[in-house]
Amino acid sequence: MIGVKAVVLSIVAHVLGIAGAVMVLVWCIHFRGGLAWDSSNKSLIFNIHPVLILIGLIIIGGEAIISYKALPLKKEVKKLIHLVLHSIALILGIVGVYAAFKYHNESGIANLYSLHSWLGIGIVVLYGVQWIYGFIVFFYPGGTASVRRESLPWHVLFGLFVYILAIGNAALGFLEKLTFLESSGLAKYGSEAFLVNFTAIVTILFGAFVVLTSLSQPPNEDKYSYFAL
Amino acid sequence: MIGVKAVVLSIVAHVLGIAGAVMVLVWCIHFRGGLAWDSSNKSLIFNIHPVLILIGLIIIGGEAIISYKALPLKKEVKKLIHLVLHSIALILGIVGVYAAFKYHNESGIANLYSLHSWLGIGIVVLYGVQWIYGFIVFFYPGGTASVRRESLPWHVLFGLFVYILAIGNAALGFLEKLTFLESSGLAKYGSEAFLVNFTAIVTILFGAFVVLTSLSQPPNEDKYSYFAL
């Protein structure tokens, strides 16, 4: 555990999260033509994918992680916020993955051949397993005190592992899409290419501050609020 | 710190590291035609890049990290092994980056436009800064006892951050190269595509076991051998 206050680190994370959300919206709406669930312009269906994955799975998922550490609230309240935010993140993530399949299927593009797609499916499954295990052991019906105590470090470690994988896979997705666009003529040093690369870098920095927050000092010194990493 | 013995986790890491090294060599030599520093077939120059980055920066760099935790040796011996392995990793990494520039320059391909290239430069610089700081504070001339004690957790945390970035950037590199090859006609579900994707997955698993080893129980319970994460 590092000797920095969680609240300070979490503020940096919030700012990076807001920046990332704005950047992915500017990219998909301003540069890529907007979002649509049904359209003859199939690219608009694709655009839902980065928006929901970044704002949902990554940013709301990151806020779910840091909420349990950085909020100066009672454990039971923090646990409920942690659970609800992760539920929203997972649902938006699943809809975001579905949008990618819908775009592929309606455009005649192959599914599930790339590393990004393989890792993406794996991450959603692992995130779901982690959510179910957390719900059963820590929320309802709840494990015994010893099961909770022994599960907690593994819940934190496995959760951070899945989250770091999601951050890495977001970077893979930005690179993959930009490579496709550049091979179709998009300027390699143009403003859109820079925006996408910097959105990926802001995403990585957000992820780093989420992980740092989870390793830092909680406001109320509740030593069980997180595993003594 | 997790309650699993470092030696057990480090053995899994060694096996994954050997598998990754064999896989990248099979890819670059069997599927991509081999390695050459000078050749009219510029692809052979490129092939040096993934081989040196994966075997050097990632695998030898990972072994450098776990050597300090998992070897049942005296602290001074482990420190020397840690330093020498990181030196080899960094040198091979720099030569590997240079091979990518050499390939680009001799083939008329643009440099430094992709996320992979930006992160790659950043990682080599951060790895170098970490090496220099570690050398000065922990090796020669060496900081005072209090400087060492306060530096150690940050050395571990920053080192793991740079290492996780390197693992993620290796995945970006595999995906970027495979996307180029597939857009030039390589079969999306063919044996080479599967080999590259599985090499990336083995790399990610290797990185995960390196990080896990660094968080686990050292053989001789030397509590200063690593930061009490």
Image (spheres, coloured by chain):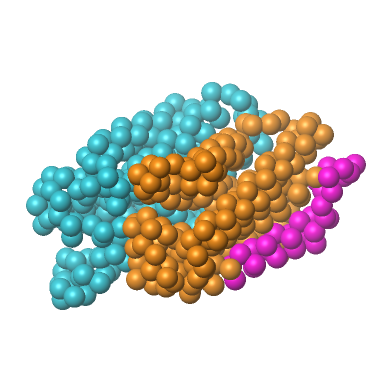
Chain colours: A orange, B cyan
Q: How many marks?
A: 0
Which one is nearer the viewer's eye here, A127 or B163? A127
Residue name at image x 81 percent, y 35 percent:
A107
Q: In the visual, does B102 lie left or right of B68?
A: right
Q: Let me know if residue B13 is in the magenta part.
A: no
Where does the image place residue B126, in percent across and percent down from the top left?
Answer: 39, 63
Snapshot quadrant of residue B17 = top left
Left or right relative to B199: residue B177: right
Query: Can the viewer see residue B159?
Result: no
Q: Main secondary structure of the magenta part?
A: helix
Question: Where residue A13 appears, x then y in whole percent?
Answer: 54, 67
Residue A186 % position (x, y): 73, 54
Q: Nearer the viewer, residue A63 or A102?
A: A63
Counting from the top left corner in percent of width and height, residue B80 is at 15, 55
Name the residue at 62% across, 31% down. A113
* Residue A19 can be seen in this image: yes
Relative side of B95 to A54, left or right: left
Q: Where A71 falls versus B78 (above or below)?
A: below
Give the magenta-colored segment's residue range.
A15-44
- Is A19 a magenta residue? yes
In the image, B69 versus A140, the foreground residue is A140
Q: Is residue A93 above or below residue B137?
A: above
Among the 4 quarters of the image, the one containing residue B49: top left
